[in-house]
Structure formats: structure tokens, C-alpha cells
Image (tube, helix red, strand yellow):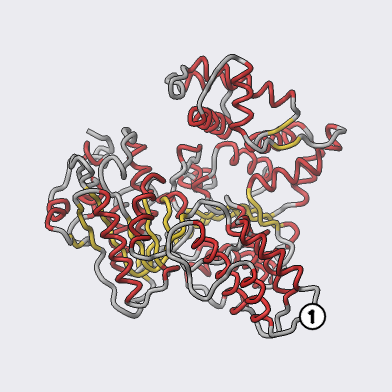
Amino acid sequence: MSAPLDSLDEQQREAATALRGPVCVLAGAGAGKTRVITHRIAHGVDTGAYSPGRVMAVTFTTKAAGQMRGRLRALGVEGVAARTFHAAALAQLNFFWPTVARDSAPAIVDNKVRLLAHAADGIGLDLDTPTLRDVAASIEWRKVTMRSIETYAADRPGGVGRLGADRVADLQRAYEKLKDERRQLDFEDVLLACAGMLEAEPRVVQAVREQYRHFTVDEFQDVSPLQHRLLELWLGDRRDLCVVGDASQTVYSFAGADPSYLLDFDKRYPDARVVRLQTSYRCAPEILEVANELMRGRPGALRLSAAGAGGGERPVPQVTAYPDDAAEARGVAGAIAAQLRAGADPRTIAVLYRAHMQSAELLGALAAEGIPATVLGGRRFFDLPEVRQAVLALRGASVAPMSSGFVDSVRDVLRSLGLTEEPPPAGGAVRDAWEARRALLRLAEEAPAHTTLRVFTDQLIARAKDQHEPAMRTVTLSTLHAAKGLEWEHVHLVGLAEGLLPISYAGTFDEVDEERRLAYVGVTRAARTLSVSWSRGSRGDRSPSRFLAEIGTRTLHAVDARATSVARSRPSAAATGRPTRSGRVR
């Protein structure tokens, strides 16, 4: 057996040894999809089936691509193009554009909202920033779904905010005209321009297809029509394609993601090998029961089972009702304080919610308990001013002989920048800066013996490039969208009330289904413990989320008597968005 396969289970090994496409891997939460992708590529290289330079592994975030390259390096594989769709398309544009257009490639728009504001001024529109952001989102959706401005106006007759559809179309035209005048491309144009170049230039498409023979696409449920078209152009009439995804984690439909490409893969390729990874190595059985109930009967849903009983106590996930949001925040903060007193590492705890606005109350409650917290989705770790300052200072110190040991030298540099032995009070920028510097020191303490300052700073720069960020010793607060792809030992899922999850504007069957998948993502981020909560709101007019009723008393333990009735009464299909036996919503 090839060494890359030694650590895989039977289903993972089946996927990793299917070296010729088409292959579809349906991988549930915690089922080891990244492990399968990287081990499959390593096995292909190990057996001579693949040349690393002719493999492209496509994923959706720069961080995920960096992690994939890191895992491949650990398996002894170098030279694989592990990139996002945009990074791959931009590289091809920059390489071929001078030959095709006899000019350098256009610059990339660095701020779409600012450019939109200039375009709005040009046609006499005075718009606030939120409206401009919404129009920017409408442009992104139009392009990734491959619609013209005219088609978009017909498909979205309601317009954007107070702007009617005609004025939105006028603003989009003005934006495109201004962008062309400045010789710029926006993020979505990169994909459009690359696809157009491949369609129009036989020499280019031949060169690309000669370069890349084997394709793997991660998170295939999130592919948009434009990304799928680009993938088709890369492939041509070849079939060496492996896609990996989970329809239950489709949470970007609003941004153009189309899960039908994953769900209908075996229709497009009737001879495709389909492998289902339904063993979760992340979640406790009790948590998987909640997830399975939530997604019961949904298209493409996998029935997950735990890899083993595991060790330690595994309490049944609980649901708690609170009288208002402040009480909910205090209750969650108190529960986290108890977990910390019991020995939990704050890095293993997360509070997840539907909307950013929910974070403020939670941050205040955690600070009142003296618990440091970080909101996910803010500035990247290596972009923080105190981190950039520290890396520069460490780099400068590395040119001089070390007067003490490596770790002591790092500590001395960080002390000179403000790191103290005892942390400042939780909450605020001072504590955030202290946590960032402490995370750098912790990386030094965990470094191999005989590491030098020069090597350490080189590693920090490499980590920054791959977005391989250290975990600060703080509790994580995150929206459900930002939490996708991550995991924690202990998860507190808050705001399970109608109007929050599902969100108030989710009115159609498909929109409610997307909200259900978001809840599923939240549940499956938890490895050992899961707590769910909701509040009646400041006016006492909120009701518990329909998703709580769907999960039921068998899998959720009601802590507060006021929440007990949630699990006992099951709403109708019309209320839940669940189909009837005919497949229709009443």
C-alpha cells in the first residue's frame, strides 16, 4: 500500500485511490475531505499517475489553498497548483494577456464601493454607503450568474433599496464605463476575462490544457455558473476531474453558488464514481444526532455517524430560553466562564450567530466575566499593526548575535513592544494587542529546538503568505458564514429564534432551506459539546426557531421550562418549509 493511504479509512481510501475521473466525493462535516484530497494527489504522484506540475487543486479561499499546499508539502509533494478560482484565472490572465493583447493586463479594482460612488456622482445619484454596498453585491451576483445588465434588470425588478431597477441598471452601466475608462477589472471580471480569453484564443486554451491535466475542486457545492464555465474551459473534453463537497453546507446561494453542479454530477457523468464519506471524525454522536435531524429529508443530505465513542463526558446538547438578548449574552458568558474554570482552553470555545449585530452584546457580557474574545472576520492576524511591528522588530533582531536563547530573545523583543507577564483587563484594543503578541511568543515556544530568529521570522512570513494564522488564547465569536470550514471543541449557538435564524427576510422555501443549512453548519462546528439558545427579545415578541421543533426532544435537552414546549410542538410543513409527501409546500 502507498504510504499516503496508510491513515485512511475504507471509504477515504476508496476515494483516494480513484485516480482517474470523473470522481465525486460527497463528504459530510468532519469526514476528512481535505485529508482525502491531499492524500489522493499524493498517491497519484507516488504511483506515477500524476506529475505534480500538471495538477490543479481549486478551492474557495486563499487560506484553504495555503493549508492544502502545506499538507501536500508534509506528504512530500511540491509543485501542485493549489489555488482559488480567482488566483488561477488571474495568473493565466497575467501570463497570456501581453501575448494576446500586446499590452500589460489591466489593474484590479481595489475598492468596488468607492468606484461605484464615483460612478453614482457621474450620473447625479447621491447614495449612502450601505446602498452602494448592496449595488456592489448586485453586480457580483449578476456577473457570477452570467447575466447581462438587461437580464439582471428583468430578473430583479424590485431594484436595490430605494433605487428602482432602472436606476440600478443605469448605475451598473456607469460603473462599467468608468471601469473601462480607467482600464481596470473587478474581482468577477477576472473570471469573465479569463473565460473569454480561453473561448476566443485557441492557442491559449491549448496551452492551459497542456499544462493542467488533472483537476480537483473542493467545496463544489459553492461553485457558481461562472466558475463552472471556467472549469469546463480548463477541462475541454477531458474527464480527469474530482469534485468534493457537501450539499448540506451550501450557504452562499445568495452569492451565486449553485449546488446542482454537485447534486447532478452523476447525471452529467453517468459513469462517475461516487464515494460517500459519512463517518465524522469531529463531532460527538449526540451532536451528529442533532445535525441529522435538522437535515432529515433534504436533497443530498448525508446521514453522519461518529467514528467512535471517544473519551470523556459527552452531555446531550441543550437548548435554553432567555427573556431577552442581554440575559442570553450573560447566560452564555456564564456558561463559558464555567467551562474555563473546568480547564477548557479558550481557543477551543466559540459563540456562533447569524448576524454581526449580535456580537456587541456578547462581547460586553464576556468582558464583564473577564473573558477575552476575538471576533472572526476582522483584520487578519498578520495584518494587525502590532503583529507587523513585531515581525519587523524580530527580523531586525535576527541580524545580530543572540545574547540569550531563542525563546528568550523573542520574549525580549516582544517585551520591548509592550508584552507584559500579566494580561490587561479583557475587552478593548489593549487586550487584543497583548493577545496577538502572546500568540507570537507561543509560536516561538512551540518551535523546534535549535530554531534561530532568522528561521523563525522566515516561518512567520511564510505563514502570513499562506494565511496560516496562530490561534490566540481567546474565545471566538463568529457569524455562521465565517465559521464554515472551522471547528471547536465547545460551541454555543445563539439566537435560534424566528427572525434571527431563520432570518426575517427568508420567506421562500429555498431561502428557509438556506437558513437551515446555516444552522447545520453551526451545529457541526462542535466537536464535544453544543449548547443552543434563544431569547424572547426586548419586547417579548420572539418565538423559538422552527428548527428547534424539527430537531425535537430526542436530541435536545431543554434547560429552561419555557423552552420545553418548543420541542413538543411540531409546526406544519407550511411553517417549516419542509415539503409534503408530494414534494410541495402547502
Q: Can residue 26 be seen in this view?
A: no
Q: Quadrant of the N terminus?
A: bottom right
**Residue 311 in the figure: left or right of residue 2:** left
Q: Can residue 79 be seen in this view?
A: yes
**Residue 218 in the figure: left or right of residue 580:** right
Residue 107 image offset from top left, x and y in percent: 75, 36
- Which amino acid type is marked by label 1? Pro
Q: In which quarter of the image is the C terminus?
A: top left
**Residue 393 in the figure: left or right of residue 502:** right
Quick one: label 1, few (<14), some, or many (20+) residues within 10 Å? few
Q: Is mark 1 on a helix, strand or loop?
A: loop
Where on the picture, by quarter, is residue 578? Answer: top left
Nearer to me, 138 or 68: 138
Residue highlighted by disc 1: 401
Nearer to me, 486 or 326: 326
| 351 in relation to 452, above or below | above
| 380 in relation to 540, above or below | below
Residue 490 image offset from top left, x and y in percent: 36, 66
| Residue drawn where x is 74% and y is 62% of the image | 79
Residue 463 image offset from top left, x and y in percent: 65, 64
| Residue drawn where x is 75% and y is 29% of the image | 183
Where on the picture, by quarter, is residue 161? Answer: top left
Q: How many labels does the image show?
A: 1
Where on the picture, by quarter, is residue 82? Answer: bottom right
Residue 154 image offset from top left, x and y in percent: 48, 18
| Residue drawn where x is 38% and y is 74% of the image | 344
